[in-house]
Image: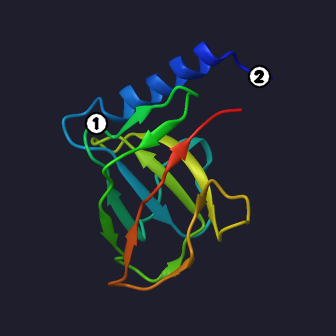
């Protein structure tokens, strides 16, 4: 199934509005292991990256471009395997896989084996639908 551009833009705007609906900024959380089913509670994140508010913009081609992200410090050792976008109130918005560049994962990191104290920076993040 493919959606028309206007529909993709509306869907991207709905995601952006959901991310920014809380008084606090949204976050991207990186986790080890497997994601819980149906957006269930997750174990402690390896790293939290706080997004700016607003957390992004919508391009002419319906890409949600996350903006103004900060660095997050790794709090626990582990292999990053999946990520979750959450609202400022911690409500899940999207789960996605994590992998090395070229692996086809939604989130690509140059190193997936994370060590406490290391910094992870989100740059060039785009969310899009086919």
Tell me whether circle 2 and circle 1 mark residues in contact (CB < 8 Å). Answer: no
Q: Nearer the viewer, residue 34 or 130?
A: 130
Q: Residues within 10 Å of mark 2 (few under 14, many from 20)?
A: few
The answer to whether residue 111 is left or right of residue 52 is right
Residue 40 % position (x, y): 51, 46
Query: For the view shown, which residue lies furthest in the left direction?
Result: 23
Q: Tell me what residue is drawn at x 25 percent, y 33 percent.
A: 22
Residue drawn at 48 percent across, 54 percent down = 124
Q: How many marks?
A: 2
SS assignment at label 2 = loop
- Give the image location of residue 50, x and y in percent: 30, 55
Q: Residue at x 29, y 29 (%)?
A: 21
State the residue position of label 1: 54
Q: Which mark is residue 2?
A: 2
Residue 97, compared with residue 13, is above or below; it is below
Residue 107, above or below 126: below
The picture places residue 15, in percent across and down from the top left corner, at: 46, 30
**Gap in angstroms between the C-alphas marked 2 and 1:** 28 Å
């Amino acid at each position: 199934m493919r959606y028309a551009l206007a529909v993709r833009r509306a869907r991207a705007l709905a995601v952006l509005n959901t991310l920014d609906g809380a008084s606090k900024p949204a976050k991207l959380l990186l986790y080890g292991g497997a994601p819980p089913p149906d957006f269930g509670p997750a174990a402690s994140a390896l790293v939290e990256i706080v997004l700016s508010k607003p957390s992004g913009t919508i391009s002419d081609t319906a890409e949600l471009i996350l903006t103004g992200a900060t660095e997050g410090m790794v709090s626990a050792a582990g292999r990053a395997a999946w990520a979750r976008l959450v609202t400022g109130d911690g409500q899940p918005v999207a789960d996605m896989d994590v992998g090395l560049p070229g692996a086809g994962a939604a989130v690509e990191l140059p190193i997936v084996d994370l060590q406490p104290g290391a910094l992870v920076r989100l740059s060039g993040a785009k969310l899009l639908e086919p």
